[in-house]
Amino acid sequence: MADEPKTRPTDADVEAFVSAVPHPVRRRDARTLVSLLTRVTGEHPTLWGPSIVGFGTYHYRYASGREGDMAAVGFSPRRAATTIYLMDGVDAHADLLERLGPHTTGKGCLYVKDLDDVDLGVLEAVLRASWSTLTAGDVGRRLSGPSA
């Protein structure tokens, strides 16, 4: 039997979570991202685990048999930077990210220290493209492999 995913949707109040973010820039950026992602996705935010604000869901299944559900797009206001989760991977957005402004990346994470320093139009395009991919099911099929 597969392990239960650690990150699951909760009933926690997203506005209370955002209001409690200690760093003023991360708090401001969290409010901006809630507004932006609500507009992009048409979904209401949900707190996933203790610190990820997510929008929508998608189902993933790996070749190993591990599967579960996760927010289709989301972010977390971390101490060093705001982490924006691009579940279809950062590489899928390389061209746009070249025009974003100051940021760093991981495999599926975009790290931004201050949204005032980046092009919000480019960020919206990245988030819209990622949302479209995840909600169309393309990633689920790709993660499942050819035998799915």
Image (cartoon, rainbow, N blue to C red):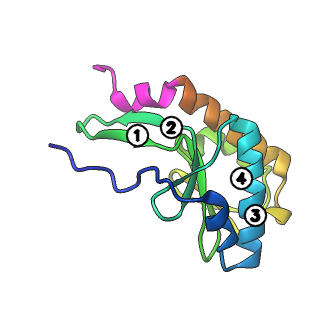
Q: CA distance from mark 4 to mark 3?
A: 9 Å
Query: Counting residues from the N terminus, which is met first, the one under dot 3 or under dot 2?
Result: 3
- Quarter of the image where one finds residue 29: bottom right
Which quadrant holds the N terminus?
Answer: top left
Outermost residue toward the left in this view: 1
Q: Residue at x 27, y 34 (%)?
A: 63
**Percent coordinates x, y for residue 138 in the rendering:** 50, 25
The residue carrying mark 2 is: 57
Q: Amino acid at mark 3?
A: Asp
SS assignment at label 1: strand
Q: Secondary structure at mark 2?
A: loop
- Residue 21 % position (x, y): 65, 74
Q: How many marks?
A: 4
User: Mark 4 or 2 closer to N-term?
Assistant: 4
Q: Are marks 4 and 3 in contact (CB under 8 Å)?
A: no
Marks 1 & 2, CB-CB < 8 Å contact? yes
**From the viewer's perspective, is the residue at label 4 or at label 3 nearer?**
4
Mark 1: amino acid: Asp
Which callout, 1 or 2, points at the residue further toward the start of the chain? Answer: 2
140 part of magenta stretch? yes
Q: Which comes sooner in the sequence, label 4 or label 1?
A: 4
Q: Nearer the viewer, residue 12 or 100?
A: 12
Residue of label 3: 29
Residue extending farthest to the top is 147
Please give the residue where the numbered disc 4 appears in the rendered image: 34
Magenta range: 137-148
